[in-house]
Image: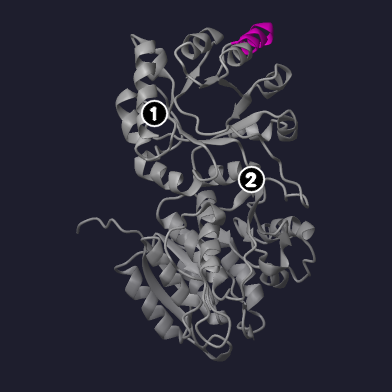
């Protein structure tokens, strides 16, 4: 048999005859993500946009037949669990999941947004006992989290503790979604934790009543992104952007609230959530100085001597990245580089050493993801420095977006032959997608594995800037290479 190329996701959930939630929302989401969707229907809800008239639970034999049919031919890469409408259904799903090796997302559907409770009493304890230990990710809203914990969640300050307590019940990780009860700074905030690490995903507050299927769509989008090979953190960022897009584009079709729109991969920065370790303060947003336009050719060098040599060639943006010095020697390199930037009226950014960048009055500082946990962002912003951030994945772009930096570096575009890096090369097509989403609000530079020959293809994406290291510093004639690269940038502008 030929190997299949398209990932397969199962939705084990209830059918919504109105088409706004449940199996129907899941299949529409899978389609948008390029995933083949299969279904195990656990219940049939006679439902329209304003009422649930009747719910019929799928008989055990019919449920088993669906599972057996799929398991013998269309095995799942990922399973999304939705409405599990009876104790018998929960028991059967638990039994099957004991030997299922793939990723499991569970949306613990306990009620309908339009007509109240969907689950009989007693199911909650069975979910906790039999399903939570097999859920790689649980996605309850506040109401469902309250049912699981048998207590109220009264404010955003209660959310982190509630999510941690649900993990303690057995779930491997939890994304606790807030919806309309969870607003601050005109944003909606969801919290994820695995019991050891945690972060907030904050998205735009979209004023709409057309929210049917939002929870189903979020969980199925996460499942689909995982099936496509994305790490869980990236999948959650993509899924939240997808739901925000769907809420923004939703329409009312019947007499009641409409459902979330399903219109393809999210492509607008307005829908991209920001990722923060801590809940954003009321009204507090850092602001970093602008770079006043595109970055252009962006060499990365390890000495002030190289800064001097390349600024003399007309380079206007350059990064000093010194890893081999410390103490007075490091301070002297930074001091000389900053002075050269002022002499040539150029953007000289200091990699990592933000304290020295502040004390020496540098144009800006460039930080990697690990440095974001250590640097004092408020001090950098208050000093008027520009901030650049390296990103490799969706969750890292979302984290950079939470800080509103002066520019964003995207990479690695290609694999670097001389480096063992943990990130999969993003490639030109993904770079083009980032340009479409980010470039209207952030100057971008592309980095990673780019040599002189590849630079033209990279610039053709519209990124506006290419960051180069060895292609310049190891060239036989660096000045000639810089001249050609600068001309290439000007042609692409």
User: Where 312 sits versus 150, above or below?
Assistant: above
Magenta-colored span: 325-336
Q: Which residue is mark 1?
A: 490
Say if 303 sits above or below 127 in the image: above
Residue drawn where x is 36% and y is 34% of the image: 492
Say whether disc 2 or disc 1 marks the residue closer to the N-terminus.
Answer: 2
Residue at 42% from the left image edge and 24% from the top image edge: 419
- Secondary element at tag 2: helix
Q: Is residue 220 magenta?
A: no
Residue farthest toward the bottom in the current orientation of the protein: 53
Q: The N terminus is located in which quarter?
A: bottom left
Q: At which x and y percent is residue 117? A: 64, 83
Give the percent coordinates (x, y) of residue 134. Answer: 54, 61
* In the foreground, 448 or 127: 448
**Residue 379 as seen in the image, left or right of residue 238:** right
Q: Is residue 101 visible?
A: no
Spatial distance from mark 2 to mark 1, Cα to Cα? 31 Å
* Residue linked to disc 2: 402
């Amino acid at each position: 048999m030929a190997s299949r190329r398209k990932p397969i996701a199962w939705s084990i959930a209830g059918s919504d005859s109105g088409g706004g939630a449940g199996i129907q929302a899941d299949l529409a989401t899978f389609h948008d993500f390029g995933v083949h969707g299969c279904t195990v229907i656990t219940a049939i809800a006679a439902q329209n946009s304003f009422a649930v008239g009747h719910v019929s639970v799928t008989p055990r034999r019919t449920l088993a037949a669906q599972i057996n049919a799929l398991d013998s031919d269309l095995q799942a890469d990922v399973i999304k669990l939705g409405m599990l409408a009876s104790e018998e259904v929960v028991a059967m799903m638990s039994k099957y999941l004991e030997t299922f090796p793939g990723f499991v997302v569970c949306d613990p559907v306990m009620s309908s947004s339009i007509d109240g409770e969907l689950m009989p009493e007693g199911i909650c304890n069975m979910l906790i006992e039999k399903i939570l230990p097999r859920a790689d990710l649980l996605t309850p809203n506040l109401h469902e989290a309250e049912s699981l914990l048998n207590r109220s969640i009264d404010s955003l300050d209660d959310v982190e503790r509630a999510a941690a307590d649900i993990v303690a019940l057995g779930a491997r990780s939890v994304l606790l979604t807030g919806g309309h009860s969870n607003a601050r700074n005109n944003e909606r905030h969801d919290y994820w934790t695995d019991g050891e690490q945690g972060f907030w995903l904050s998205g735009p507050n979209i004023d709409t009543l057309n929210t049917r299927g939002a929870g189903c769509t979020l969980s199925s989008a996460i499942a689909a992104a995982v099936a496509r090979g994305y790490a869980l953190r990236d999948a959650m960022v993509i899924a939240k952007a997808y739901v925000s897009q769907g809420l923004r584009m939703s329409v009312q079709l019947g007499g009641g609230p409409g459902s979330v729109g399903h219109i393809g991969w999210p492509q607008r920065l307005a829908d991209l959530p920001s990722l923060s370790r801590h809940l954003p303060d009321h009204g507090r947003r850092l602001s970093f100085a602008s770079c006043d336009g595109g970055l252009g050719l962006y060499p990365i060098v390890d000495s002030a001597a190289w800064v001097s040599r390349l600024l003399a060639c007309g380079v206007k943006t350059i990064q000093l990245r010194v890893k081999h010095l410390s103490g007075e020697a490091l301070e002297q390199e930074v001091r000389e580089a900053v002075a050269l930037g002022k002499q040539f009226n150029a953007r000289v950014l200091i990699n990592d050493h933000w304290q020295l960048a502040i004390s020496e009055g540098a144009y800006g500082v460039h930080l990697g993801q690990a440095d974001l946990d250590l640097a004092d962002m408020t001090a950098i912003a208050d000093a008027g420095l520009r901030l650049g951030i390296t990103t490799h994945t969706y969750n890292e772009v979302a984290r950079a977006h939470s800080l509103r930096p002066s520019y964003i570096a995207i990479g690695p575009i290609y694999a670097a032959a001389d480096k063992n890096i943990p990130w999969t090369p993003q490639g030109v097509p993904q770079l083009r997608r980032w340009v479409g989403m980010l470039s209207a609000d952030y100057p971008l530079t592309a980095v990673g594995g780019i040599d002189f020959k590849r630079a033209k293809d990279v610039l053709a994406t519209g990124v506006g800037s290419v960051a180069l290291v060895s292609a310049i510093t190891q060239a036989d004639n660096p000045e000639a290479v810089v001249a050609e690269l600068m001309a290439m940038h000007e042609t692409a502008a």
